[in-house]
Amino acid sequence: MNPMSSVWRWAMASNERAVANARAAATECSRLRVERVEVQLYVERFGQSSVEATTEAAATAR
């Protein structure tokens, strides 16, 4: 067996694994970004409805 062919196979396998790792990391980062935006939107909506309910309750209590 030619030593260069084994080095070449190792290099190709290493590169394929690096690409797979990068793809997995990018997917995880995207998932976390979407989750963060969803939570932010939920908190904003909850905060608005909470403020509106508090304001309405204060107005009717007067």
Image (tube, rainbow, N blue to C red):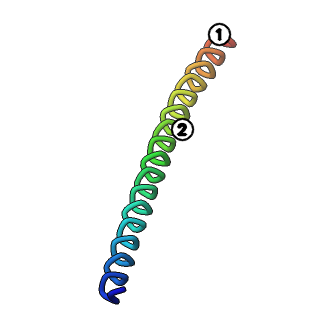
Q: Residue at x 61, y 18 (%)?
A: 53
- Nearer to the camera, 15 or 48: 15
How far across and down, in percent of the image, does residue 28 sit?
A: 48, 52
How far across and down, in percent of the image, does residue 46 sit?
A: 57, 28
| Tag 2 secondary structure | helix
Q: Residue flagged by tag 2: what amino acid is it?
A: Val
Q: Residue at x 51, y 41 (%)?
A: 35
| Tag 1 secondary structure | helix
In the image, taking residue 28 as reference, residue 10 lies left or right, namely: left
Q: Which mark is residue 19?
A: none
- Nearer to the camera, 10 or 3: 3
Q: Residue at x 66, y 13 (%)?
A: 62
In the image, taking residue 41 as reference, residue 16 lies left or right, namely: left
Q: Residue flagged by tag 1: what amino acid is it?
A: Thr
Instruction: Tell me the quarter of the picture where residue 24 sits.
Output: bottom left
Q: Earlier in the sequence, mark 1 or mark 2?
A: 2
How far across and down, in percent of the image, does residue 32 sit?
A: 49, 48
